[in-house]
Amino acid sequence: MAMNVRTVEVVINRDAAAVYAYAHRPETMPLWASGLASGLQPAGDHWVASGPLGTVTIFFAPPNDLGVMDHTVVEATGVSTYNAFRVTPNGADAVVVFTLLQAADATDESFACDIDWVRKDLTRLKAILEGEADATI
């Protein structure tokens, strides 16, 4: 059965290459991805973070020239979530798009909260990259 899907997109007034160069690095993510505020620690071919879901393992797409920042989050319970995340050139600007899939056990209300959370994080990323927000935790 197909899951409900929503995309959250934000236009950032910066070159797509600059947006990708900043946003794809796990070291910068705690500055704008609020669920990772405690930081990420490298652990071989993946990263480990503590946040609202507890301790999670994150596998990131390798650096690339296509703006692909996909990542898989594996919770301590073993539940794995694939997250499609892209930066696409939009003239002199960039559009970042995060695709959310509603898990089978997620309520419509919790899915709406996830959408709002992603929108808030992408808006924070935009503010940092456009120089409107402090990039410190």
Image: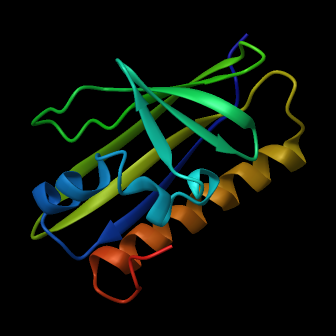
All told, the count of numbered labels is: 0
- What residue lies at 72% left-to-right and 16% top-to-bottom? 79
Frontmost residue, 105 versus 76: 76
Give residue 85's position: percent from left, percent from top. 40, 40
Q: Quadrant of residue 64?
A: top left
Structure colour scheme: rainbow
- What residue lies at 23% left-to-right and 26% top-to-bottom? 62
Give residue 16's position: percent from left, percent from top. 16, 58
- 125 left or right of 109 in image: left
Residue 10 in the image: above or below residue 100: below
- 135 left or right of 55 in image: left
- 55 left or right of 104 in image: left
- What residue lies at 59% left-to-right and 54% top-to-bottom? 38
Q: Residue furthest bottom?
A: 132
Q: Quadrant of residue 11?
A: bottom left
Residue 108 in the image: above or below residue 123: above
Q: Quadrant of residue 71?
A: top left
Give residue 131's position: percent from left, percent from top. 29, 86
Residue 16 in the image: above or below residue 26: below
Give residue 70's position: percent from left, percent from top. 38, 32
- 16 left or right of 37 in image: left
- What residue lies at 36% left-to-right and 19% top-to-bottom? 44
Q: Quadrant of the N terminus?
A: top right
